Amino acid sequence: MRSFLLVILFLLSSSLAAAERTTVRAIVSASNAPPYALFDESGSLSAGISKDILDELSKRSELNWQYLPLPRGRVEQWLLRDDADIACFLNPAWVEQPEQLLWSPALFTTQQVIVRRSTSPAIQNITDLFGKRLGTDRGFSYPELDAIFAQRLAVRDDASSLQINLSRLQKQRLDAVLTVDLAYLYHQQQYPSEDLQADPLWAEPANVYCALNQHQPELTARLLLTLQQMVADGTVANILQRYRQAEPSNQSTPVL
């Protein structure tokens, strides 16, 4: 906590800060599965955890927001180049240059899960993945499994969405799908299926943060302090809880 406050004080006192802008460029990756991000038919961000958190951050910081729906693979570079100010649902282990970014307090933790057909054996350790084709999210990092992908002990098969991966799994085009607990829970609430089963990955749950660029010290300090308040007063936890209890949408599973 002390080191976090020291960062804030440094940013606030920086004499090199550019004139404060009133519009924050916030990345909401189009690769994030619901309920983290929900987009309408025009491709605009319409709802989701990310929008709720950032909307509240916008309200409290009294700043305007511009949402940038980028693919996951472009997020880090846009922050490093000062083409964007903030992106959430990241972890230092998931980017190439974490030391070049500033990090908020942890927003929450997320558990990775491996989804399989319910008729398949449980996946309990890394050797259970050998020889399997795994559905993954394009642009996402999987540090715990990078070694087996590099050694071709398992096949990484990217898709643009969790829905596509789960559809391919049910059609037996994949052996398993990698995702996170809340995304899978939300999908099952919207499209209930007894054909699927999720096993937790053996790794510890990961903390999830917002990453901010270092080019706008005054703006960054303002956002970091507000995020700290939102975590401390339970705002972020309440937003998450709403989506854990989401009502089914009564939509049929899309044909992909």
Image: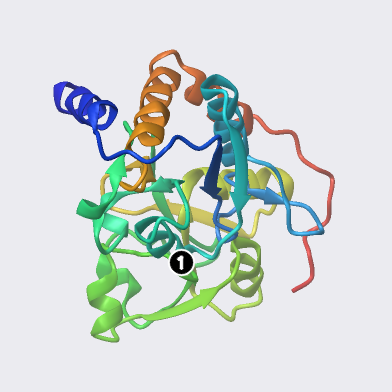
* Residue 52 placement (x, y as % from top left): 61, 32
Res 216 → quadrant: top left
From the top left corner, tell me how far across and down residue 255 is, in percent: 79, 70
> Horizontally, is 132 left or right of 34 in the view?
left
The crowding category of the residue bearing disc 1, from other C-alpha atoms within 10 Å (few below 14, some 14 to 19, many at least 20), is few
- Count of labels shown? 1
Q: Relative to 146, is 179 above or below?
A: above
Looking at the figure, which quarter contains the N terminus? top left
Q: In the rendered image, is residue 107 in sight? A: no
Height in image: 226 above or below 214? above
Q: Quadrant of the C terminus?
A: bottom right
Of all residues shown, which one is farthest toward the top? 233
Image vertical order of residue 43 relative to residue 12, above or below: below
Question: 211 or 23, which lies in front?
Answer: 23
Q: Which residue is at 51% across, 23% downward?
A: 61
In-image side of 216 versus 238 (left or right) = left
- Left or right: residue 86 compared with residue 94: right
Q: Is 162 displayed left or right of 226 in the figure?
A: right
Q: Nearer the viewer, residue 250 or 100?
A: 100
| Rendering quarter of residue 103 | top left
Q: Position of residue 65 (x, y in %)?
A: 60, 39
Residue 186 shows in this picture: yes
| Residue found at x 34% / y 80% | 154
Residue at x-position 69% and y-position 33%: 246
Q: Amino acid at mark 1?
A: Arg
Residue 226 % position (x, y): 43, 23
Instruction: Identify which residue, 184 or 158, lies in the foreground.
Output: 158
Residue that numbered label 1 is attached to: 74
Residue at (64% x, 60% y) in the render: 195
Report the residue that reaches farthest toward the bottom: 152
Q: Secondary structure at mark 1?
A: helix
